[in-house]
Image: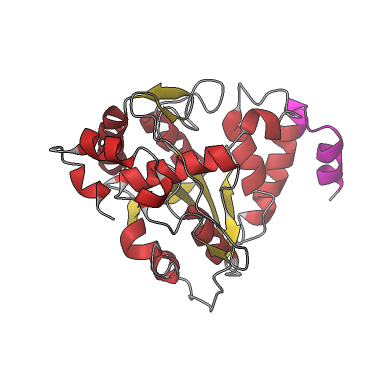
Amino acid sequence: MLLKKIFQRHYSSGIVLDLYLIYQKFIYNKIRLGNVAMFHTGRCGSTVLGNLLNQNPEISWVGEVFEDMQKRYRKYRWRKEKPLKILEIIMYSRECRYFGFETKSMKEQHLRLHWIDMNLIDYIGALCQLGFKHFIILKRRNYLKRAMSATVGFKSGIWHQKKDETNNPIQINIEINNFKIGNTSKHLLQHFRDLDQHYLELNSILEKKCLLNLIYEDDIQDNPISAYNKICDFLKIEPVPVEIRRKKTNPFKMSEVIKNFDEVKETLRNTKYEWMTAE
């Protein structure tokens, strides 16, 4: 307890940080059964799923630790040089049997320069060294709906909604030639190809590890408790009853939201992604 108080007062000191982590690991490793890393690219139901997982007393799920990290963790002067130390601090501030968090894992997202600043294979290797042995890949098959949801979020500033909140369609344009992803912009088709490649790479790196693949359309879209149950089974813990407290932010037809929907459909015509325009 004394060491924890010292750390809270002198959190920017590397020596104090190392002492704090040694102390916390000694305390919490006695009860910790595992650490879980989830990878996704955003707008795929991870928030509603994380909320369900957090209702299970066996799990502490902290979501996207590295989202907006330069602002959230500016008190740590060493954050740019040691971003994974932030994760360690959070890991060992939670008294739980299973600890879990999420990474938006494309190179333009949390792994980019001035954030984590690592390539995917090195990042996963670093997580293994930190004690992560369970991995989840969450994918949304329909890239166009993911793109629509992200664009609406950027325009409205509304990324999540509680179950009792009302929502109305917000109209947007999909920037076909300059679609924004993380800190870059690219052609929409190139973005979709990059998503394909990214999921192939993730599965290749993780294929020999303890891995669970979840699909938004199969496991979350209609009933997110299905994904919750699969994760509990994956971790071999009891799936205690939980309550869905979030709802979809964009339950509308794409033609109601995307003002240039005809242009988007024409762009995807005669490509492997054409099916994504189906209402």
Q: Is residue 248 magenta?
A: no
Residue reaching furthest to the bottom? 241
Residue 262 at what x, y percent from top left? 28, 40
Q: Is residue 137 visible?
A: no
Residue at horizontal 54%, vertical 37%?
Answer: 154
Magenta span: predominant SS is: helix
Q: Pick the residue in front: 250 or 53.
A: 250
Residue 131 at what x, y percent from top left? 50, 46
Q: Pick the residue in front: 18 or 140.
A: 140
Residue at horizontal 56%, vertical 58%?
Answer: 167
Residue reaching furthest to the left? 270
Residue 15 at what x, y percent from top left? 75, 28
Q: Is residue 30 above or below residue 192?
A: below
Q: Which residues are magenta?
A: 2-16
Q: Which quarter of the rendered picture does the C terminus lie within?
A: bottom left
Where residue 118 sits, quadrant-wise, is: top left
